[in-house]
Amino acid sequence: MSSSSPVELTLRGVILGALITIVFTAANIYLGLKVGLTFASSIPASVISMAVLRYFRGSNILENNMVQTQASAAGTLSSVIFILPGLLMMGYWSGFPFWQTTFICATGGILGVLFTIPLRHVMVVQSDLPYPEGIAAAEILRVGSPTQNTEGVSDHHNKSGVEDGRALPGGRELVVGSGISALFALATSGFRLLTDSVTYWVTAGRTAFQFSTGFSLAMVGAGYLMGIRGGIATLVGIVFNWEVVVPWVMHHTANPAGISPSDLAMQVWSSQVRFMGAGVIGVAAIWTLLTLLKPMFLGVVSSLKAVSKVDVGQSRMDRDLSPRLVGGLSILLLLALLVIFYQFLHHAAPTLSVTVLWATVIACTLFAFIFGFLVAAACGYMAGLIGSSSSPISGIGIIGVILVALVILALQHLVGSLGPDGTHLAIALTLFTTSIVICMAAISNDNLQDLKSGYLIGATPAKQQIALIIGCVVGALIIAPVLQLLYEAYGFTGAMPHPGMDTSQALGAPQATLMTAIADGIFHHQMQWGMLFDGIVVGIVVIIIDSLLRRTGRASLPAIAVGMGIYLPASVNMPLIFGAFISWLVTVRLRSRAKRLGESVERVSDRPKRRGVLLASGLIVGESLVGILIAVLIGATGNEAPLALVGNSFAGISQVLTLILFFLFCVWLYRYILRYRIK
């Protein structure tokens, strides 16, 4: 063991991590608001870090790990968009106040880091939980630094699976994917030379059937990462929605005079059938939580018992932030929550009685703090068990909204109402409180994955925890401006900042819409309970089918993906399916290649699979950043199409041109991923 500790947390690494965090946070916000999905940034951040820091003297695998640890906050803290836009949708906010939004994200995020520190030793060091993203990130770092070793790493942990010492391809794939996606998005959303979607309607009597697809390359990338099982499940939801449920409801709905079948179909879907999708999503997320309840509880109890037995002085690789520092920061952040809730309530209802005001402030603060700790433990364990990407943060949001609403209703019964506009304020307070819990859940969902990566390559946990706190602060500072920019440029479904804006360009923010509808329904008793109940029934049926399919070991039908197929427009969902199908074709081809060459599937698939992941990440980043750039131009000029080169008369040609280019791109993506040949 060397006498001096290796360089890990450096100023240049912090600056690079902050820059990556800013870019990926902005991209994730755009993607999440558009389709309800975010992408994991650890692997792309690792590749970028290795590509940049290799030109600096003394850079090493541990420094690269700190950069990806800090930047991973981009894919997690941005999950606050799953609920915070609801405050605009319900009309409580007219924009995103910078300091309030920043403090919500920073406070919740840092608490998420602190709450998972006591769980690290048993859940990471002594646990056999798979931590898929954490192990993958560690492998990327190792392969990218094949000649480097680290202090104190066992032989078992130091195996990278690379026999010939070749470095990982990466930076080029990210740049290529980002560039192509950016150009395509610029031609579509900017110059309007290409169309963003094509929709065809088939009418039969009083009913209409929709066949639609979009051409978003970011969605293709997201679908590639999602995989074929999620893609098939989404397609099932689309077909069930537009070819079964919507026509059936239309057949039993009076057709008002002057409304075309296609317009009526869209009305039926948006006002009724979407709640069925919400029901499927809700029951799927809650079912996932229930299936993990027992192992999660046992893991958390075991971890807490082990905290007192850990001797953190033995090695730097066992050294967390000190209990005194963690406790002190937790108390400070608890007080910060009190201030945040007081400011929120006092500003909204300055005439509220002192008793009601402080009772509500204390109740919401304690709920966010205590429930946040339980959520942090739950999400940390779920991330280790099934991965951060599969962990149902939306389910945490649904449970949080329901519980907070019940707490506020009980408080109003005990101490009095929240004023003359108490119901409206209660809904806003429910969303506000849950947004803090979501930040805790999202960061804790990611934190243990990063600590697993660090453990495998011999990093210092305390320094990783500092890096993640820095990432939370940087991400929190960028979230409010990006949200405000996108809101002013595009608006959200049900919340347009300016009259006369193009509602077809509005960002859907599906989870925020769902959370707002649930909160509003609880307090107003006006939810589409019939469709929601139907969605729950459909979700239960899909869960049963999924369970039966999983027993075969060959297939599955994720219920939450079926729900998204119902809940989101088909034009948004279809590119996901194209990406998932390309991913499946690549897998089939790689297996065939391995059989032909007499090599293992893992050896033949290693490079192409990583290339596909990085290209897909680049597709997401490129389009997202162009979307933000166009949003800046819209905000600066006041013109909804500041870069448009053609008018509506070009629509017919652009549809044909876009179809051809999109098909050619899909073929190119497939061939480019497979172009590597093992030697």
Image (cartoon, helix red, strand yellow):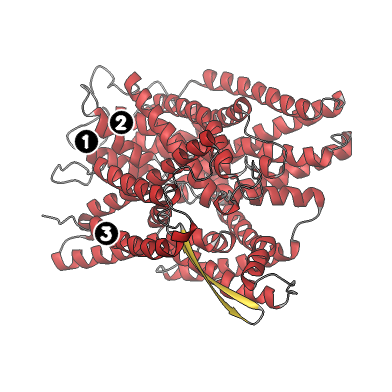
Q: CA distance from mark 3 to mark 2?
A: 31 Å
**What type is the residue that disc 3 sits on?**
Trp
Picture quarter with the C terminus:
bottom left
User: Dot 3, crowdedness within 10 Å: few (<14), some or many (≥20)?
Assistant: few
**What type is the residue that disc 2 sits on?**
Asn
Residue 483 position (above or below residue 311): below
- Tell me where residue 580 appears, x and y as whole percent: 39, 61
Q: Is residue 300 left or right of residue 600?
A: right
Badge number at residue 64: 2
Q: CA distance from mark 3 to mark 1?
A: 30 Å
Q: Are marks 2 and 1 in contact (CB under 8 Å)?
A: yes
**Total numbered labels placed on residues in the image:** 3
Mark 3 secondary-structure assignment = helix
For label 1, the residue is 145
User: Dot 1, crowdedness within 10 Å: few (<14), some or many (≥20)?
Assistant: many
The residue at 52%/60% (across/down) is: 561
For label 3, the residue is 668
Specify the farthest residue to the left.
Answer: 679
N-terminal of the pair, mark 2 or mark 1, is: 2
Q: Which of the 4 image quadrants contains residue 205?
A: bottom right
Q: CA distance from mark 2 to mark 1?
A: 10 Å
Badge number at residue 199: none
- Tell me where residue 166 appears, x and y as whole percent: 15, 43
The residue at 53%/29% (across/down) is: 476
